[in-house]
Image (cartoon, rainbow, N blue to C red):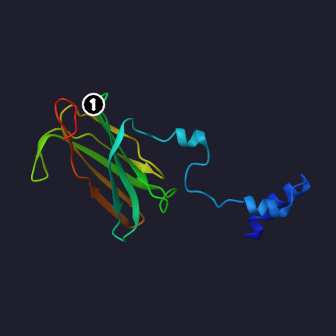
Amino acid sequence: MRSLLAVPAAAVLLAGTSAATVVATAKPASAAPASASAASALPSCPGVRVMRQPIYTNRKVKAAYIHVFYDKRTGRACAFVNSTYATWGIRKHMSLRLWHCVGLVNGYCLTPLATPSRSGWYSGRSGTLTVNLSKGCVKAVGTVSWGGQRGESTTKAFCVRSSGGWV
């Protein structure tokens, strides 16, 4: 820890601030974006979050979450996969698929209307997927893998009435 603060502390001491102030205000490195501009560059979804499902790997690491949002105004569902603090910054393969269906039978999609998907290598958050959900249900399936670790998770269904209300 001393060696990490030695150069900044010396520079601050030259500027007239005490070493105690430097140590008291030093913060550990964060896994989150370092600036507002980096945070604003991350994908996001409009509306209200209706589902948040963790993805655990075969080694029991909570690697990511599937986030699903619903925007009642536009009737669209939007989703992305977001790394957890433990895996933020690690380059990993993420995939996401949305299952949009007329309805559900025993938890299974009845008459899939659309199944958009995306995959790629990400170190934080995947890109977003959207689907028009003015009626029917949506489920999301997400996967994460890197360095011998692999995980998959499926959310419960979120359904709306044809009038746009939640079921």
Residue 47, by quadrant, is top left
- Image coordinates of residue 8 in percent, x first then y, are 80, 58
Question: In this rendering, is residue 22 above or below 69?
Answer: below
Q: Give residue 1's position: percent from left, percent from top.
A: 72, 69
Q: Nearer the viewer, residue 136 or 80?
A: 136
Eyeballing the image, is 155 above or below 130? below
Pick the front one: 165 or 144: 165
Q: Quadrant of the C terminus?
A: top left
In-image side of 39 versus 131 (left or right): right
Residue drawn where x is 9% and y is 53% of the image: 106
Please, is residue 25 above or below residue 69 in the view? below
Q: Which residue is at a point 89% across and 52% down the rendered structure image?
A: 15
Residue occupying the point 33% across, 69% down? 58
Q: Amino acid at mark 1?
A: Gly
The answer to which quarter of the image holds residue 14 is bottom right
Task: Find disc 1 in the rendering and name its residue.
Answer: 75
